[in-house]
Every structure is written in structure tokens, then in C-alpha cells.
Image (cartoon, grey):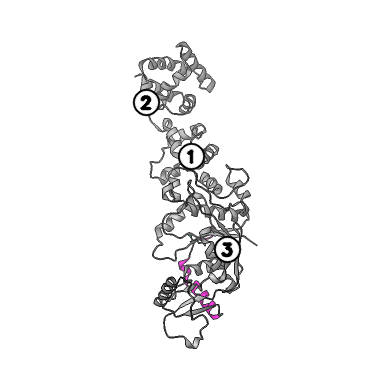
């Protein structure tokens, strides 16, 4: 059996972080098994679905690197096929025409509520003789089993049992002949050959109803895996209150996609004690058994931590490329060729201890800025007359240095010693001269990245 999974988002806003995690699990599972991963846009709800929201989903998938097989499927475009299946069920006697009016059903519910009895509507048309059918609008309802139980053998939740007496004869076609969402999902999953339905556990109750359509049609049932929803750090369902919910907000905060994938994988799934891992490892390790039964809590610190590790472990050129993508996505000015060269040269040190692209850019100020460097307020304080005097002595010695790290360290140490001062004391004025700030990569790394001419020119700028 070839594994086929899918992500089936409803395009009604931004791409939710929970959708991204569900997509990741489906993607990893399909790729691990050499199967297919499909994308279906569930745009049946015409009032809530927008093309902008579909675009946001496509951008999110693209950013996260979730390559799906084939074209994205529009659920709405398949409405005729959904209706066809409803008519099939009708013809086979698994569904029936229900002529009850909205008013009748509402009145029934009201009475049941008042009497404190079940509000589950039992249509009198289920077993009616077709000869008694009026010439009036009707909906098509599925004949649900009424006795016994339906057991969903869920790969995450275990066996989940539903009493069939609680299932209503769900509507498949509305009175205008349009199919409902619950039917569309099943028909699409069947037609797309989906073998594993991995999705949020807010759909677990739907599974008990959806599976009846498979059974009535005699279709192979998929494996269900319902994953607990993501909670905030306080244990409540993740909401705006906790922070960003949209995938693109995380892109805009400057987290690399690989870090996001790693973090999302750990959000509800585990492989031993492994926290930091690569895509290849995730693909190799991912399984449904590793998905936890209780909701995972979103932890921004952990995301930062993993992000820093991914940045540090990245290939320099790939990181620079992704940084350029970040700048473009967030509408910031693109890097010039010279800036790119400087960053490429300095990436080995820039990527240490940067948890996001904005932090990386902040560290790279010294390569991104052009002479003359204007020190910020704090850095300006390091450039007192005494310090400038020492820098003025240092400059000619640097001119003759070999520009190896050892040599640079020795030259600076000698000048410091001559003034009976610590090397650390010289770091402040040097940072101010080279980067215009007090916080920067090490002065030796900056000198190595900037090169002799630029370093000396910057020192001369402050002397002047
Ligand atoms: N469209 C549904 C959602 O966005 C997913 C349905 C499914 O996965 O079966 O929640």
C-alpha cells in the first residue's frame, strides 16, 4: 500500500500555526513512507473562503518547504462529484429524501428542549414509502446506524467508541442540491486515495459520522490519527492572547523555516529525548506512535533556542540566501553585492548566538554599515580622548600586522600592556570605531572580516 496523506485547510484567514503542524506531520509521514502528500483547499464555505486566504496557505506551505504532490485541489470545484455520491447513496437506499421543513425541525427542537429530552432529530421520512413523497423541496440524509457502536481505531487516541443512538441522520445534500462539507471531505479523501487522515482532534467527532459514508459506499476506510490541539503556555487552547497564530508572522519574526519545522515537530511529537534535529532525521524518525495524547504547550523560549541552534548549524551560503528571502518577505531593502560579500565572509561568526534573522542583521551592522561609522550614544561614550589616543597608537602597528588572528591579538595585547590596561578595556573603543556599537562580534573577528584597509580607515575616522 502506498501511503497517501493530505492537508485540507479551510481558506478563511491566515494559515494557522496548528495547520502548519498538521501539514508537517502529514508531510513527514508521507515522505518517510515514500508516499504522496496532497493539498486540498476546503473552500466549500463560499461566504468565508477567500482567494487571499488560499494564497496565504500556498505561501505558508512554500515557506515551510512542504512540497505537495500534484496540484492543489479545490473542494468547491468538485461539488458535482460530491452530489453524485449523495445520489448514489440515495439510489442504494443508504440515504433518503427528507421533506421536513426548517420550521418543523426548529419546533421539534424547541419542544424537546422544553421537555428535557434529546434534541436529536429523527426524521419521519427515513422509512417513508416514496409514493407518499410530496412535490416539495427536500434534503438528502444519510441513514445512520441506530443501534450498537461505532469504534474509531485511532492511531493516536486508541479505540474511541461512539454510541450510534447519538448519531443523527446527517444531511448530505441541502434542499438546493448543494453538498455539505461532511460529505465533501469523505468523497475527496476517497477519490484522492488518502490512506491516512492525520488532523486535529477537533475532528474526532466528525470521524464517527464520516466513517458511515465510507461504509455505506463500501469504500476502504482510512487510518485516522487525531492529534491534540496546541495549547498556550498556560495550558489553555492557543489563542491570540498567547502570541502569534499565523505562520507568516513567524516568518516575519525571522525564524528560519528549518527551525520552525523542528519546533513544530516537537510540538506534540517526540523521539526519545531528541530536541534539535534535521529534516532528514525527522523524516527518518517520524511515526504516529510518537504523537502524544495530551495537548502540547507552545513554548516561545524553546522555539528561540532551537532557532539559534539551526542558524548556527546552517550552511553559510544557504543562510545568507534565506536571510535575503526574509528581507524580501518583510519588505526590507535588499542587500547590495558588497554587503552580501561582507556577510558571506563574516557568516561564520555572525551565525553564532543569533536566534533570528533580525538578531543576525543586528550582529552584522559592522559589515552592513558604510564609513564613516556613526557611533550610537553608548558607543560614543567609549571614545573618550584617552581611548582615542590609545587607538591612534594601535593604528600604525596594525598597518604592519600580518592580519592573522594570532598576530592581531598580539598587537592589541602589546598596546594594551604598554598602557597598563586590560585588553578588555580596549575592546569598547574598538567596537565603537569598527561597529559604532558596544555590542558586536569580537573585535578580532570584525577586523578579519573587514580586512586591513577598512579597519584602518575606520580607526582613522574616529581619530579625525
Ligand atoms: N478543513 C478542515 C480544517 O481546516 C480540515 C478537515 C480535515 O482535515 O478533515 O479544520
Mark positioned earlier in the residue sequence (3 or 2)? 3
- Up-down: is 157 above or below 140? above
Query: What is the CA distance from the residue labelled 2 to the residue labelled 1?
Result: 29 Å
Element type at mark 3: loop
Please report the residue visible at 58 percent of the width from the left and 53 percent of the height from the top.
293
* Main secondary structure along the magenta-highlighted residues: helix
Element type at mark 1: helix
Left or right of residue 263, residue 113 in this image: left
Please report the residue visible at 41 percent of the width from the left and 83 percent of the height from the top.
136
Residue 73 falls inside the magenta stretch: yes
Determine crowd level at label 1: few under 14, some 14-19, many 20+ residues with C-alpha closer than 10 A: some
Percent position of residue 31, x then y: 60, 54
Element type at mark 2: helix
Quarter residue 164 falls in? bottom right
User: Which of the two marks, 2 or 1, is nearer to us in this view?
Assistant: 2
Residue topped by disc 1: 320
Q: Is the N terminus in the top left, top right, bottom left or bottom right quadrant?
A: bottom right
Residue topped by disc 3: 194
Query: What is the CA distance from the residue labelled 3 to the residue labelled 1?
Result: 38 Å
Residue 296 versus residue 286: which sits nearer the camera? 296
Span of residues in magenta: 66-91
- Up-down: is 147 above or below 284? below
User: Which of the two marks, 3 or 1, is nearer to us in this view?
Assistant: 3
Determine crowd level at label 2: few under 14, some 14-19, many 20+ residues with C-alpha closer than 10 A: some
Residue topped by disc 2: 378
Please report the residue visible at 55 percent of the width from the left and 65 percent of the height from the top.
207
Percent position of residue 116, x then y: 46, 70
Percent position of residue 22, x then y: 53, 55
Please report the residue visible at 59 percent of the width from the left and 68 percent of the height from the top.
150
Amino acid at each position: 500500500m502506498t501511503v497517501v496523506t493530505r492537508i485540507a485547510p479551510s481558506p478563511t484567514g491566515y494559515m494557522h500555526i496548528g495547520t502548519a503542524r498538521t501539514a508537517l506531520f502529514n508531510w513527514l509521514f508521507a515522505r518517510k513512507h515514500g508516499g504522496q502528500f496532497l493539498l486540498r483547499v476546503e473552500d466549500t464555505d463560499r461566504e468565508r473562503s477567500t482567494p487571499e486566504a488560499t494564497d496565504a496557505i500556498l505561501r505558508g506551505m512554500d515557506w515551510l518547504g512542504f512540497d505537495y504532490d500534484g496540484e492543489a485541489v479545490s473542494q468547491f470545484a468538485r461539488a458535482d462529484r460530491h452530489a453524485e455520491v449523495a445520489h448514489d447513496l440515495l439510489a442504494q437506499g443508504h440515504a433518503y429524501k427528507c421533506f421536513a421543513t426548517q420550521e418543523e425541525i426548529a419546533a421539534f427542537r424547541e419542544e424537546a428542549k422544553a421537555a428535557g429530552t434529546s434534541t436529536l432529530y429523527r426524521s419521519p421520512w427515513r422509512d417513508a414509502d416514496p409514493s407518499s413523497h410530496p412535490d416539495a423541496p427536500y434534503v438528502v440524509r444519510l441513514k445512520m446506524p441506530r443501534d450498537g457502536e461505532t469504534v474509531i481505531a485511532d492511531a493516536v487516541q486508541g479505540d474511541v467508541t461512539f454510541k450510534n443512538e447519538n448519531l443523527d441522520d446527517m444531511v448530505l445534500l441541502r434542499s438546493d442540491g448543494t453538498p455539505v462539507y461532511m460529505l465533501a471531505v469523505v468523497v475527496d479523501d476517497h477519490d484522492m486515495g488518502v490512506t491516512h487522515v492525520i488532523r486535529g482532534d477537533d475532528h474526532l467527532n466528525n470521524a464517527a459520522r464520516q466513517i458511515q459514508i465510507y461504509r455505506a459506499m463500501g469504500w476502504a476506510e482510512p487510518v485516522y490519527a487525531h492529534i491534540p490541539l496546541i495549547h498556550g503556555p498556560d495550558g489553555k487552547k492557543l489563542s491570540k492572547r498567547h502570541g502569534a497564530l499565523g505562520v507568516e508572522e513567524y516568518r516575519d519574526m525571522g525564524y528560519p523555516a528549518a527551525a520552525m519545522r523542528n519546533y513544530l515537530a516537537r510540538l506534540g511529537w517526540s523521539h526519545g529525548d531528541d530536541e534539535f534535529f534535521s529534516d532528514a532525521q525527522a523524516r527518518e524518525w517520524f511515526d504516529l506512535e510518537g504523537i502524544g495524547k495530551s495537548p502540547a504547550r507552545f513554548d516561545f523560549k524553546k522555539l528561540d533556542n532551537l532557532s539559534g541552534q539551526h542558524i548556527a548549524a546552517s550552511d553559510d551560503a544557504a543562510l545568507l540566501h534565506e536571510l535575503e528571502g526574509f528581507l524580501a518577505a518583510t519588505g526590507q531593502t535588499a542587500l547590495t553585492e558588497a554587503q552580501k560579500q561582507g556577510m558571506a565572509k563574516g557568516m561564520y561568526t555572525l551565525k553564532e548566538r543569533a536566534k533570528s534573522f533580525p538578531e543576525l542583521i543586528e550582529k552584522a551592522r559592522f559589515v552592513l554599515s558604510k564609513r564613516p561609522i556613526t557611533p550610537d550614544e553608548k558607543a560614543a561614550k567609549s571614545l573618550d580622548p584617552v581611548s582615542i589616543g590609545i587607538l591612534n597608537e594601535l593604528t600604525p602597528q596594525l598597518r604592519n600586522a600580518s592580519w592573522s588572528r594570532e598576530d592581531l591579538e598580539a598587537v592589541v595585547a602589546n598596546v594594551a600592556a604598554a598602557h597598563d590596561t586590560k585588553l578588555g578595556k580596549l575592546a569598547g573603543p574598538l567596537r565603537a570605531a569598527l561597529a559604532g556599537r558596544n555590542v558586536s562580534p569580537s573585535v578580532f573577528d570584525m577586523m578579519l572580516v573587514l580586512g586591513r584597509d577598512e579597519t584602518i580607515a575606520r580607526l582613522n575616522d574616529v581619530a579625525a
